[in-house]
Amino acid sequence: MEFLNDLRDQVSTAYALLAAGWGVQLLWGIAWTLAVTIVSMLIGAVLGSLVAAAKLSHRGGLRFIGESYTTVFRGEPELLIIYLFYYGGTQVLTGVARSTGSIGSTDILNMPSFLGGVLAVGIISGAYQAEVFRGSFLAIHRGELEAARAYGMSAWLRFRLVIVPQVLRLAVPGLGNVWQLTIKDSALISVTGVAELMLTANKAARSTHHSLLFYTLAGILYLVMTSVSTPIFEKAERYTSRSFMRPK
Amino acid sequence: MDFDFYLSTMWSVLKALPLTLEIWFFGIAFGLLIATGLTWMRASGYKLGEYFTRGYVFIFRGSPLLVQLYLIYFGLSQFDFVRHSPVLWPILRDPMYCTIVAMALNTAAYESEIFRGALRAVPVGQIEAAKAFGMSAFTRFRLVTLPIALRLALPAYSTEIILMTKATALASVVTIMEMMGTAQKIQHDTFRPIEVLTCAGVIYLLLNLSIARLFAWVEYRLSPHLRPPPEQSQQIKPVPEVL
């Protein structure tokens, strides 16, 4: 009985805290996390396809650049890359601004935290997406490329009509994994001060001294985000491979 | 370019390498123990064990390691029984132990999935052959299933170990002065983040590359039967042109 009373107290405290404004803050945190993840995925998609193309290239130099990119950005701690882009960006921006005289010689021009974080997470995501795209390109049936060539299609036409549609279809499951990874990486950019879910939970925990409550809530919200995206990607996979399914 | 700065930074960060390796090693070792337990529960065939493992994997793979670390370090100390426990409190009050606990719990979820996949990938024919030989369940596991499954799990396991190396950097957010924490401190003191982080980055990269090399070597040694046969030494000599 005492346990039940205790539980009721806990729930009412939690409700009071959330109703006092932390609930809305956490919802904004989710919105920012999703914004960071989506923008990073887009940056990663652009970089990833370029790097995949470089890794598949016939030129040794390009292949080397592609290999180094994926090795470095998959081999370094994510935190280090984020610090590098945030603090390193500040260093570069300050240096440039000081030399052009747009700020005083003791002032500091900070890297915008959202930009720095998104660039860092996007570049990491790009390294993983490059591997996904490369794998899907290699999975395209060689005969189809040869057939396209035999039809006399130009390189651009082959790319647009044969390669892109199939790479996109084959890449969907892999991209789902990268998406999950990017959601989890986005929690790390809280160290640069982007008010996403992790930082909001952190602030709430520090200022209300209910760290258990807020970190558990953050964990649950991350779980909701990752598990909601699973069926969405499954649906996308069914949609993109609809012409390959057996008729019912 | 002043090389002295690079060298001194490199050296200061390298001095923190033992601490990083300590977190890494204990995280992996305890993680392996938990993962073995989880895999065993999952494979045992009991519904309860299977549901527990599924839930565990869902929770620990679905949320960021940073949340898990904060929850263990800041969150659990709110319970009175934790603070009054003679066993739990010394562990959960120390940021170092907390990082190791968080890493072990996290990696166990991924590893148990790797091991489950490897166990399922053992060819049925091998197990049937072992049964036909009249091996007991334990002998079959020891001599047939386990060796094959371990080799199949190795590539994915090496990826997981590299992810763990990267995860040790998170210890710096709970005040541990391992390589990342040391780099952070130097960076704040000198305000030269690009140089300092590059030095730390080189060390992390070399560490990960050597781990990958090591695993590739182990994998090579463990699969002699999958290698192509050595080149034939007696090549057919071209017939000399005789008129």
Image (tube, rainbow, N blue to C red):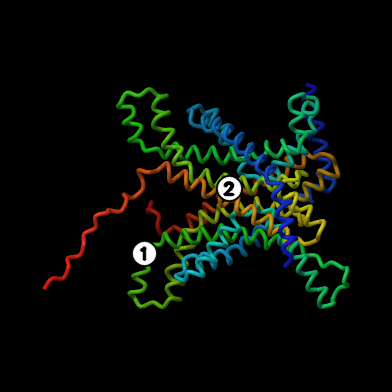
Spatial CA span between label 1 and label 2:
33 Å
Q: Are marks 1 and 2 in contact (CB under 8 Å)?
A: no
Residue appearing at x 51%, y 30% in the figure: B40
Please state the horizontal and vertical placement of residue A236, each as a whole percent of the image: 52, 56
Q: Amino acid at mark 2?
A: Ile
Looking at the rendered structure, the secondary structure element under dot 2 is helix
- Residue sitting nearer the eye, A8 or A211: A211
- Is residue A31 among the parts visible in the rendering? no
The crowd level at tag 1 (other Cα within 10 Å; few <14, some 14-19, many 20+) is few
- Residue sitting nearer the eye, A28 or A146: A146
Q: Is residue B53 above or below residue A53?
A: above
Please state the horizontal and vertical placement of residue B60, each as a whole percent of the image: 62, 40
| Residue of label 1 | A142
Q: Amino acid at mark 1?
A: Arg
Q: Quadrant of the N terminus of chain B?
A: bottom right
| Residue of label 2 | B162
Please state the horizontal and vertical placement of residue A32, each as a whole percent of the image: 72, 57
Residue appearing at x 49%, y 58% in the figure: A171
Please state the horizontal and vertical placement of residue A183, each as a whole percent of the image: 64, 52
